[in-house]
Image: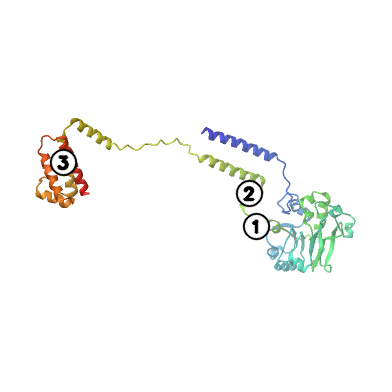
Amino acid sequence: MKSLKLYLIIAGILLVLYIIAQFNRPKIIDWSESFSDKEKTPFGTFILYNQLKDIFPKSKVISFRQPVYSVIAEDSVKNSSYIIICQGLDITKADYDQLTNYLKKGNDVFIASTYFGKAFEKYLKIKTETLLKLGEENEAVNFLNPVLDPRRSFKIDKGAGGIYFSAFDTLRATVIGENGNHKANFIKYSFSKGSLYIVSNPKLFSNYSLLNPQGAEYAATALSYVKSSDKLIWDEYYTQGDIGNESPMRVFLSNPALQWAYYIAIFSLLTFVIFEIKRRQRIIPVIEPLKNSTLDFVNVVGQVYYEKRNNTNIAHKKILYLFAHLRDEYQIKTNKLDNEFVEKLKSKLGIEAAFAREFVNFIQYISVQNYISDRELIELNKLIEKLYIQSA
């Protein structure tokens, strides 16, 4: 018990020291490109999502975690604009057809992504490439609209200007912005009453970019091209997946504090189980089984008879025990030792006729003697043993 308490105390001290070290450890920056509106990491979109009301003050922001087709197929999204900011999307032919119908009805769509899928490549001739060598001029982006001063550059690092459109339908698309190498990174497609705005790098709308004054101005200016409508649809499907795939455990582990609480609880439970495996009750004493003292009793009784030297008594008792055996095992009457007794003894025990007669005669002799010598007692014992052996 004392050793168990010592182990628990040591484990508790180590756990406390570990927790203190974790809380005082410099927080590691997560540079993963999630573009999720729930993430405050550099490449999340938490800031942009919460500033949408400032950019579109007359619009009601509605979030959806469904594919494009499912979202805009509903009648409730009429007179709206649609914003998708993600690492990559690969919409289907049905999604594209529904999207073009949505645009032709006078709605705008704004997409910022590095990959647009086969449907966009087929119908809009869109391809993107990344500059392998980035310089200061490649970190700058600018607008081509004369009203916005094309000579003014917005300098944003972390490769914000490194992804551009290497191909697009020049007959249908209008270039709105480009990077420092004069490669288009912001284009527009017109569909009747609506417009499709496409940006080649979603990092321009990330938390990291919006914390830079130039980045915040660029994002607000780019989104100002989207018309202000009654509803603003904000996509979460391409950054967080279908809402049906959201598990409670995923939500639990997404919070660092809850995540550490979960790990500590598991560690504590395992420690408790390991130490509780040992039984803490007193040792059960081993009870020795009772010793068989029959042989000792026989030896004591035999010693008593031997010291008294009463051969007659011993001989009569041996004969009585023998007769009891014959009555119980073979149902032979022993009150008369006549010829009938001899015949039954021979037939039921299967002994020789001569031995049966000899045995009965000697029993009759011993039974009438007042004194029996040691030789006669030994002879009686031999005959009884021989009888047991032949009848076996």
Q: What's the CA distance linking mark 2 and mark 3?
A: 93 Å
Tell me residue 75's x, y (percent).
69, 65
Quick check: can you spot residue 206?
yes
Q: Which residue is mark 3?
A: 319
Residue type pointed to by label 3:
Ile
How packed mark 1 is, by other alpha carbons closer than 10 Å (few <14, some 14-19, many 20 or more), is: few
Q: CA distance from mark 2 to mark 1?
A: 15 Å
Direction from residue 21 to residue 107 in the image, left or right:
right
The dot on residue 191 is none
Residue 243, numbered label = 1
Residue 121 percent across, percent down from the top left? 77, 66
Residue at (67, 40) in percent of width and height: 22
Give the percent coordinates (x, y) of residue 252.
63, 49
Q: Quadrant of residue 294?
A: top left
Which structural element holds mark 2?
helix
- Kindly indicate whether the residue at mark 3 contacts the one at mark 1 (C-beta within 8 angstroms): no
Relative to 206, say whether 294 is above or below: above
Q: Which residue is mark 2?
A: 252
Say which of 231 and 154 sits in front. Answer: 154
